[in-house]
Structures are given as C-alpha cells and as structure tokens.
Image (tube, rainbow, N blue to C red):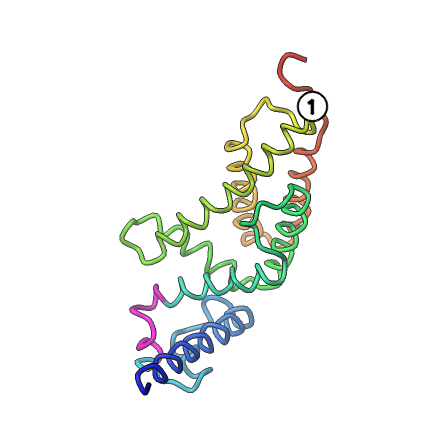
Amino acid sequence: MARRGAYAKGVAKREEILESALEVIAREGYHGASVKELAEAVGLSQAGLLHYFDSKDELFTAILRKRDEVDSRRFGAIDEHPSLDRIREGFVGIVAHNAEVPGLVELFSRLAVEAGDPQHPAHEYFVERSAAIRQTFSEAIADRQRDGRLTDRVDPDTLARLVQAVSDGMQLQWMQDPAVDMSATVDAFFELLDAKVPARGV
C-alpha cells in the first residue's frame, strides 16, 4: 500500500511540474525557462526535478505532450474522426492560441528539428503526433471527397500533409515576424480545400 501511495504522489508531482512548466514557458519564453526556474516554480532543486524525468530533453518532450493534452481539452480532440469543418474550427483555434504562447511555439519548433535524430527523446513523440494528425485530416478529407464537396485531383494523404506543412511553416514565419497572422493563413488554406473545384474527368 505504501508503495502504491508513493507512486500516486510521484504521478501527482510529475503532473504539477508539467502544468507549472507550461505556465512558466508561456510567460518567460523558451530561453527564459531554465531547468532551475522550472524546478523553483514547484519547490524542487534541479536534481529533484530531473528525478521525475530522465533528462532535460525528456522533460521538454513531456511538456509538449502535456500541451497537446490541454489543447485537446480546450479545442477538441483531433483523433476521433471529426468532420473537416470541426477539424478546421479546432485546428485554427489552436493556431490562434499559439500566438499567445510564443515560448511553447519556440520549444516545439526547436525540438522538432532536434528530433530528426532517431535517438532524440522527442523523436517518437513527433513521429506519432504527425502520423495521428495526418490520419485524422486524411479521413475527413476523404469523407468530403466522397460527398463530392472536394476535388479528388489530389489524394487525401497528400492534402493532409499540405495542411500540416502550412501550419508548421507558418509557425516558423511567425517566429521570424510576429506580425504574421498564423491562424488567418491556416484558415485560408482550409478555405481553398472548400473551393468548388471540378473533379477529374469533369
């Protein structure tokens, strides 16, 4: 029983760390959120904080997973076969929210590049996350193509990758020029998907 209680406390402390880290990084930015500052926010030493994670990169990966969980609750899950309209609403909402948390956007973008290394702690996270997003997009796009409301000149998987590429690319542009309206641009791409373009053979 004591071991189970200690485990539960450990899980609770880990959740406290992640929730606090989201706030600190959103407020202070990626560069301002050192492991020392994250540890102090939850009353731990740096060594005490890293007791709950294998490394700094593993901590940052867990923070991104927590961010996805929070965004899913706020804007709706994207892995439950929603309609393309529902995906558009939730996805554009997330992109608009990202403009309010630049530190988390920078963390995501930097880790995404570093995770190109298969040995990086975040590699599996990015691979699985990207595949899940593309599958959801692809299924919704295929549904709309079957309904005849979207051209079938481009296959659903390719269109899904394009949506993801536009979103990721806009984040990089926005980091370089905060005047860029990420959500409006992503929403404009969805508008193009809704354009009444004739199907093949028409």
Q: 156 or 22, which lies in front?
A: 156
Q: Image height check: is 7 above or below 132?
A: below
Helix or strand or loop: what does disc 1 sit on?
A: loop
Residue, disc 1: 197
x, y percent for residue 97: 63, 59
Q: Nearer the viewer, residue 180 or 197?
A: 197
On whether residue 61 falls in the magenta region, the answer is: no
* Amino acid residing under circle 1: Val
Percent of width and height locating residue 177:
59, 52
Q: Residue at x 41, y 73 (%)?
A: 34
Q: Nearer the viewer, residue 146 or 112?
A: 146
Judged left or right of residue 58, residue 157 is right
The magenta segment is: 49-58
From the top left corner, tell me how far across and down residue 165 is, in percent. Answer: 52, 40
Quarter containing the N terminus: bottom left
**Mark 1, other Cα within 10 Å: few <14 / some 14–19 / many ≥20:** some
Name which quarter of the figure residue 193 lies in: top right
Indicate the position of residue 23 as horizontal and vertical percent values.
Answer: 54, 73
Q: Quadrant of the C terminus?
A: top right
| Residue that lies at the very extreme toward the top in this rendered image | 201
Work out whether residue 2 or residue 29 is closer to the camera in this orientation and state it.
2
- Identify which residue is drawn at 61% across, 50% down: 91
Q: Residue at x 54, y 52 (%)?
A: 176
